[in-house]
C-alpha cells in the first residue's frame, strides 16, 4: 500500500465528500442568481446549475482530499527551546501596534450605538439592554474613574479605550501563552503576534466603543481556557486549574452578558460542553452553574433593580420580517385574511421603497411605527402567517434568507472592514480630537485598509465567509484524524455564527463575526497540536 493510500482511507474520503457537498451547496446558494441571470427556461437553469455545481464539487473534493492527505499525518513538533517572555512581548507589541490608531482616533471611535451607551452612562436616557447593559456598566466604571481624575469628557472616555486595548492585548497574550504550553514553536507564536499587532482592523476595533470588541475577546478567552481544561485536566496543578477555571467562568459570563446572541450561543453549547467533560462532571457542573447563576442574577434581579428595559420583539425576528417583506415586495398573492393580519401591525404603503435585502433595520423601524404591541401579543397568529407564506413561496423565503446572511458564510462578498473614523455629532460632550494627523497619516491608514482588496491571499483575512470555511476545513482535518473530542474547541465560535444565521439584522457586518477573526490563529493550529485530550 502506498503512503498516499495509508492516509487517504475510506474514512478520510467520506469526510472529504461530506464537506465538499457542504461547500458546493453554499456555492450554489450564493451564485445561482448570477449563474442563471437572463435565463427564463427552468431546464436551462437546471442544466447550468448542475454543470457548475458538478465542476465546483470535483474541484473542492480533490482540493480537500489533497489537504487531508497532507494534513492528517502532520503534527507540530514540540517546542524544545521555549521563550517564556513571548506572551508579554505579544501584549506590548499589540499595544505598540495599536497606539498610533489611539492617537489618531483620540479619545475613541464612536458610532450611534456607542453614543447611545454613553448617553445611558451620563443618565441622559434610561438604561436599556438593547445594547448590553453589562457592557454599558463597564464603560461607566472607566468613564467615571476618568472623570474623577481629570474632569474632562474626552480624557474620561480615553480611560475606557485604554482599558479595552489592554483587555484585547491580554486576550492575545493568553492565547500565545497557551500555545507555548501546548508546545507550539516560538516562530509561530511570533507570527501570530504580528497577526494581532499589525492587522489594521484589530487596531481600529481596539479603539472603537462597541460591545462586539470585548465580546470577541471573551470568546477567545473562553475557547483558550476550554482548551487548557481539555488538554491539561486533571494533570494540571491546583493553581493552573484555578487560573483556567476563573478565566473560563469570567469569560463565560461576559459572553452571556455582552451580546444578546452570546447568551443563546452559550445555552446552545452547554449540552455539548457537558458531554465533553462527561468524565469530570463535578468540574463541569461547578464551572457552568457558576456562569449560569451569575448571569441570571444580573439579568433578573439586578437589571430589575436598575429598571433596565429589554429589547423589543422586533430585534429577534429580523429574518422572518425580511422574508415576509420580500413576499409582499414581490407582489405575491395573499388572502384577504393574511392582508388583514399584515395591516394590523404595519403600513405597507412605503414597504417597497424601504425594503433592502440584507438590511433589516428599515423593516424593524416600519414595524415599530405600526403596532408592534399587537404583534407581540399575538405571536401565534403571526407565526402561522409566516409559516403559511413560507410554504406557499419557499423560493422568496430562501432568497430573502440568503440575502440576509450571505456575508457570514460565503467568501466572495464585498464589504468594508474597519473603515470607521471619529465620533459622530452628539450632546454628551465628547468630540474627536486627534493627537496625530496630517496627509501622510491619513494616506497610510487608507493604504493599510485597502491592502485587503489588493492582495488576494491577505484579503482572505478580511472575509468572514473565508474564515468560516477555514474553520470548517479545520473541523474536517480533526474528523479525518479521528480527534472528535477537539471539535468542542470550535463550538463557542461556531455557535455565535449560528446565532447570526438565525437572527442577524445585517448580512455582512464584520464586527458581528469578529470573534471568528480574533480566535482564528488558535483554530488553525488546533488540528496539529501534539497532545492527548480528554
Image: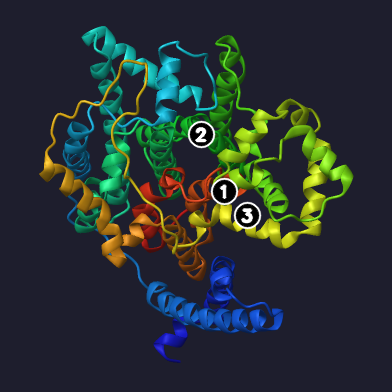
The residue beneath circle 3 is: 401
Q: Position of residue 422 (x, y in %)?
A: 28, 32
Question: How far, Cα to Cα, is label 2 from label 3?
Answer: 22 Å
Question: How far, Cα to Cα, is label 1 from label 2?
Answer: 25 Å
| Residue closer to the observer: 145 or 387 | 387
Q: Position of residue 257 (x, y in %)?
A: 51, 29
The reply to whether callout 1 and callout 2 are in contact (CB within 8 Å) is: no
Does residue 108 lie above or below 284 as drawn?
above
| Mark number displayed over residue 21 | none
Q: Position of residue 500 (x, y in %)?
A: 55, 46
The residue beneath circle 2 is: 259
The residue beneath circle 1 is: 356
- How many residues crowd mark 1 within 10 Å: few (<14), some (14–19), many (20+)? some
Q: Which of marks 1 and 2 is nearer the N terminus?
A: 2
The reply to whether callout 3 and callout 1 are in contact (CB within 8 Å) is: no
Q: Which of marks 3 and 1 is nearer the N terminus?
A: 1
The secondary structure type at the circle numbered 1 is loop
Residue depicted at 59% across the width and 70% down the height: 25
Q: Which of marks 2 and 3 is nearer the N terminus?
A: 2
Residue depicted at 61% across the width and 13% down the height: 304
Q: Which residue lies furthest to the bottom in this view?
A: 1
| Residue closer to the observer: 79 or 156 | 156
Does residue 129 lie above or below 512 as drawn?
above
Q: Position of residue 111 (x, y in %)?
A: 38, 32
- How many residues crowd mark 3 within 10 Å: few (<14), some (14–19), many (20+)? many
Amino acid at each position: 500500500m502506498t503512503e498516499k493510500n495509508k492516509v487517504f482511507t475510506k474514512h478520510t474520503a467520506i469526510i472529504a465528500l461530506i464537506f465538499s457537498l457542504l461547500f458546493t451547496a453554499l456555492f450554489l446558494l450564493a451564485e445561482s442568481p448570477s449563474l442563471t441571470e437572463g435565463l427564463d427556461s427552468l431546464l436551462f437553469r437546471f442544466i447550468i446549475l448542475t454543470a457548475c455545481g458538478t465542476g465546483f464539487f470535483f474541484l473542492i473534493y480533490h482540493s480537500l482530499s489533497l489537504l487531508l492527505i497532507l494534513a492528517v499525518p502532520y503534527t507540530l513538533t514540540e517546542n524544545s527551546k521555549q521563550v517564556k517572555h513571548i506572551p508579554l512581548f505579544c501584549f506590548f507589541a499589540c499595544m505598540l501596534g495599536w497606539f498610533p490608531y489611539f492617537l489618531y482616533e483620540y479619545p475613541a471611535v464612536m458610532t450611534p450605538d456607542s453614543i447611545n451607551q454613553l448617553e445611558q452612562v451620563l443618565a441622559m436616557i434610561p438604561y436599556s439592554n438593547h445594547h448590553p447593559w453589562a457592557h454599558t456598566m463597564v464603560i461607566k466604571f472607566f468613564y467615571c474613574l476618568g472623570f474623577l481624575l481629570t474632569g474632562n469628557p474626552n480624557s474620561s472616555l480615553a480611560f475606557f479605550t485604554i482599558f479595552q486595548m489592554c483587555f484585547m492585548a491580554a486576550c492575545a497574550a493568553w492565547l500565545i501563552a497557551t500555545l507555548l504550553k501546548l508546545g507550539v514553536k516560538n516562530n509561530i507564536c511570533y507570527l501570530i503576534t504580528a497577526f494581532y499587532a499589525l492587522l489594521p482592523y484589530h487596531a481600529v476595533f481596539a479603539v472603537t466603543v462597541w460591545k462586539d470588541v470585548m465580546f470577541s475577546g471573551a470568546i477567545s478567552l473562553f475557547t483558550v481556557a476550554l482548551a487548557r481544561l481539555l488538554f491539561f485536566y486533571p494533570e494540571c496543578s491546583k493553581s493552573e486549574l484555578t487560573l483556567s477555571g476563573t478565566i473560563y467562568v469570567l469569560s463565560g459570563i461576559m459572553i452571556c452578558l455582552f451580546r444578546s446572541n452570546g447568551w443563546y450561543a452559550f445555552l446552545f453549547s452547554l449540552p455539548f460542553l457537558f458531554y465533553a467533560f462527561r468524565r469530570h462532571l463535578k468540574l463541569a457542573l461547578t464551572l457552568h452553574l457558576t456562569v449560569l447563576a451569575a448571569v441570571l442574577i444580573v439579568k433578573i434581579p439586578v437589571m430589575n433593580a436598575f429598571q433596565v428595559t429589554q429589547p423589543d420583539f422586533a430585534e429577534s425576528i429580523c429574518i422572518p420580517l425580511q422574508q415576509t417583506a420580500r413576499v409582499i415586495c414581490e407582489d405575491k398573492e395573499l388572502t384577504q385574511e393574511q392582508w388583514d393580519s399584515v395591516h394590523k401591525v404595519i403600513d405597507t404603503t412605503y414597504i417597497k421603497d424601504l425594503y433592502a435585502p440584507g438590511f433589516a433595520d428599515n423593516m424593524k423601524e416600519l414595524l415599530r411605527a405600526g403596532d408592534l404591541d399587537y404583534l407581540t401579543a399575538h405571536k401565534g397568529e403571526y407565526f402561522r402567517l409566516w409559516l403559511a407564506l413560507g410554504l406557499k413561496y419557499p423560493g422568496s423565503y430562501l432568497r430573502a434568507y440568503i440575502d440576509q446572511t450571505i456575508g457570514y458564510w460565503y467568501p466572495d462578498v464585498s464589504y468594508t472592514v474597519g473603515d470607521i473614523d471619529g465620533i459622530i455629532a452628539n450632546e454628551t460632550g465628547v468630540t474627536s480630537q486627534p493627537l496625530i494627523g496630517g496627509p501622510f497619516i491619513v494616506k497610510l491608514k487608507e493604504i493599510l485598509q485597502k491592502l485587503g482588496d489588493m492582495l488576494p491571499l491577505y484579503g482572505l483575512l478580511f472575509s468572514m465567509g473565508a474564515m468560516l470555511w477555514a474553520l470548517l476545513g479545520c473541523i474536517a482535518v480533526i474528523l479525518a484524524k479521528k480527534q472528535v473530542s477537539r471539535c468542542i474547541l470550535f463550538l463557542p465560535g461556531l455557535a455565535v455564527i449560528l446565532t447570526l444565521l438565525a437572527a442577524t439584522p445585517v448580512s455582512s457586518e464584520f464586527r458581528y463575526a469578529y470573534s471568528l477573526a480574533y480566535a482564528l490563529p488558535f483554530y488553525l493550529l488546533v488540528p496539529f497540536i501534539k497532545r492527548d485530550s480528554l
